[in-house]
Image (cartoon, rainbow, N blue to C red):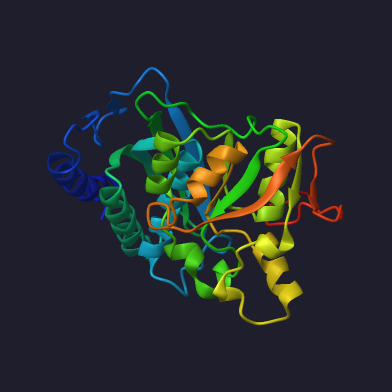
Amino acid sequence: MSEWQFIDWIRSRTDAAHKSGPKVDPVILGPGDDAGIVTLQPETIAAVDMLMDGVHFELDKIDPALAGRKALAVNLSDIAAMGARPVCALISLALPAKGGLNVGQKMMEGIMKLADEFDVSILGGDTNSWSGPAVISVTVLGEPLPGRPTIKRSGARAGDWVLVTGNLGGSLGSKRHLTFTPRVKEAAFLNTHFELTSMIDLSDGLATDASHIAHESHVAIRLDPAGIPVSPDTQNGSAAQRLAHAMTDGEDFELMFTAAPEVAREILGKQPLAGVRVTHIGECVAGNPQLTWRDGTVIEPRGFEHFLD
C-alpha cells in the first residue's frame, strides 16, 4: 500500500467519525489537503508529544494499537492539566518500511478509538517510512472551557493545599502507562466547579512534577509521606520502597493541583470526584522553590528524564 492509499484508508475512517462525532464538529477541513481547517476560540491551547518504539513502548511486546492510544492519551492529559477541552489532533507517523503498514493501521485504530471516546477530531498529519523504528508524534489543539480560565503551573500560593487524583507508582510494571485514562473529565469538573490555582499532570513522577509547580510558582511545597496515595501496583518491597516508586516511577498521568484550603476542603468533601479519589498530600509554603517532607528533609526531583550527549 502506498502512502496515499494509507492516507485514503485513514480518511475513510476520519470522515465517518466527523459525520457521527461531536454534535458541533469544529473541523471544517480534515485530512486530504495541504492543511486542515478548524474553528477554535480566540485562545488555542496546544500540546505535542513524540513517542518512539524502544523508548515509550516496545512493539515486539505489545499491540501497536496501545502505542497509538498512548500517543494520543499523553497529549489529552496535557490538555487536561490546563483545565481545557481537547478539540482536534494532528498525527504524524514514521513507520518501518518492512511491516509498517500493519503497525500504522493498528496505531491509527488505537488513536481513533480514544479520540472518539473524548470527542476529539482527527485534523490531519503526515506519514513517512524509513529504515528505523516506529515513531509517532501527536499534536492536540484545545480550547478553554466556557467562562473558565486556563490553569497554569505558575499560580500556586503560599498557604494553598496540594492535592492529587488517583494512585501513584508502578505504572510500567502493571502496563498502566499504556492503558491509563487521561483525566480530561475530572479536570473539566474541577475547573468548572472550583477555583484552582495551579495544575500539572504527573508524567515524570511526583517528585519531578511537583518541583515544576514549586519553581514556576516560586513557592516551597511540603509533602506528607503518610498522605501519598501509593498504588497497589507497587505491592512488592518495603513501605519506603513503595513510597519511592510513587514519587519517582512516572507515567501515572494523574493530576496534581493546588487550591486555597477552603476550596480544597470542599473538593475533598465531594469524594469521589467524577468517580476518582482525590487526596490531600501537602501544602505550599513561603520559601525557596523546592520540595520537602514535613520534617524538612529535601526531596530530590528524581523521575524520568531524557538525556542528550
Q: Say above or below: 15 vs 54.
A: above
State the residue at coordinates (68%, 68%): 245
Residue closest to the eye, 70 or 247: 247
Residue closest to the eye, 78 or 241: 241
- The x and y percentages for residue 225 are 73, 62
State the residue at coordinates (44%, 55%): 271
* Residue most extreme to the top: 42
Horizontally, is 29 left or right of 95 in the view?
Answer: left
- The x and y percentages for residue 160 are 66, 38
Is residue 284 among what the camera can see? yes
Is residue 129 among what the camera can see? no
State the residue at coordinates (54%, 38%): 263
Q: Say above or below: 37 vs 162.
A: above
Q: Quadrant of the N terminus?
A: bottom left
- All told, the count of numbered labels is 0
Residue closest to the eye, 162 or 290: 162
In terms of image quadrants, where is residue 286? top right
Horizontally, is 136 left or right of 227 in the view?
Answer: left
State the residue at coordinates (57%, 52%): 164
In terms of image quadrants, where is residue 143? top left
- The x and y percentages for residue 19 are 12, 40
Residue closest to the eye, 27 or 60: 27
Horizontally, is 290 left or right of 17 in the view?
Answer: right
- The x and y percentages for residue 222 are 76, 48
